[in-house]
Amino acid sequence: MTLLAEYLTTPLTSDTLPPRHYHNLFCEVSLDDIRYRKGECIRVSVPGRICLQGEHQDFLGLPVIAMAVDRCFNIKAWPRPDNKYVIHMPDLATSAAGTVDARADRNVCPTDAPASTGGAGIPACPDSAAHDEFVPSQPLTYRHHRDYLPSAVNVLKQRGLEFDRGYDFLFTSTIPVNAGCSSSSAMCVGWIKTLLALANDPAADDPKLVARLAHQAEVLEFHEPGGTMDHYTTSIGGLLYIETTDPIQVTPINPPFEMPFAGFVLGNTLEKKDTKATLRASRQAAEAGIAQLARRIPGFSLRTTPTAQIQAELPHLATESADILLANVINRDLCQEAARILKTNPFDATRFGQLIDEHHAQLRDRLHISTPALERLIQAAHDAGAFGAKLNGSGGGGTMIAFAPNRDTQIAAAIGQAGGKAYVVRPCRGATIEFKAEGI
């Protein structure tokens, strides 16, 4: 019996149960106990993410404001006597969009999105059990679209890493899955960081490089439409202002005054969504409009061309592209105002909440990515006293966030009464190696 098999089959008794989790402003991680430490060689935690300003902006090179939160993806590993990687995901599930999902968090696709042929001869995502295995030292071809675990190994092989030891891995997560909270990106960030650390590669301690490699493994390797916000936020942690043009610049926001960070509530509609399709449609329409504006406005830049000048040209564009571009430009300006507020003392919580509402209005009315379930939870949050509320992530289902300083408990209860699942969330440090055994 392997060490992990012993871990998974040991009966739960008062002396084997781990102690309660703790938060502080960090990820939810277990305190050390003998059951968690027996033979374990590494433990990595990665936070989830909420977006305060900048949905559907990062893949267009526009800035975003995002915050890592204390719903976490965790990876643990035990050595094996062979050269296999065996990944166990007992409380998570597969999904058709390549994100981790609520039954058996595998690298394969979520069951809630349509199966995809993936292009380039990659077969549709199969049904899957709660484990995966492969030999990392062998050439790895992708078994289905968004086959993230082998893709990360391939990305690291390009850096010269060699994989000559086998491990059992245990993946667990408290991040809502396929819900706009970066569950799949957190998995990719954690997986890259774990593999680098096991190889004693100093890149494991470089959060920006880990984020870049995770983005390559999750997005570029499969020619996906996603941006970089999720990877940088979950890897670096905290509240961040991210300039998403290359080279990406990340500025931690540490206001020199008290801000009610504990006043955020995450509400899950439990409504399934197709993240990649939603992002792809938004990106294609926006890029078509950008190309037309570049022909009409000398020196056009979506980042810097004044809003009034862009609005004057929008009647010449197809309606869908015009609506999406106008939303992008308005949201660009809202993000800049929010960034200024976050640097201003005293902090204007009322206006900050209004900016969240105004951002959501663009996502709902021009990008058309809200749903009745999201609107129901957002209205419930407002009725309970939230300063602002918006959908979180790509839209089309999933989660919303409410800014509710000093009323987070009441807002969480209201979201629950409206049919959602609510979490009071707090800012969190980024991907962290919680434990690594000596000699690894």
Image: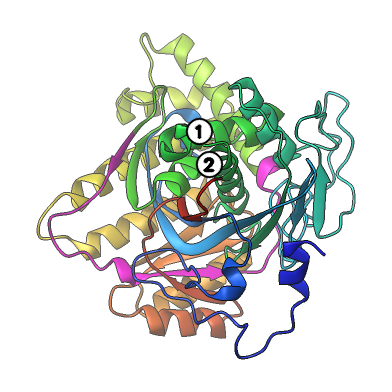
Tell how many labels: 2
Taking the spot 49% from the left edge, 74% from the top edge, the residue there is 423
The quadrant holding residue 224 is top right
Give the image location of residue 45, x and y in percent: 51, 57
Residue bounds of the magenta highlight: 250-277
- Confirm whether residue 223 shows in the render: no
Give the image location of residue 340, x and y in percent: 20, 45
Taking the spot 81% from the left edge, 60% from the top edge, the residue there is 130
- Secondary structure under tag 2 reads helix
| Circle 2 residues within 10 Å: few <14, some 14–19, many ≥20 | some
Q: Is residue 392 magenta?
A: no
Looking at the picture, which amino acid does disc 1 mark?
Answer: Asp
Looking at the image, which is closer to me, 83 or 228? 83
Query: Looking at the picture, does residue 361 appear above or below residue 28?
Result: above
Q: Which residue is mark 1?
A: 201
The quadrant holding residue 194 is top right
Looking at the picture, which amino acid does disc 2 mark?
Answer: Ala
- Secondary structure under tag 1 reads loop
Residue 197: mark in rendering: 2
For the C terminus, give its image quadrant: top right
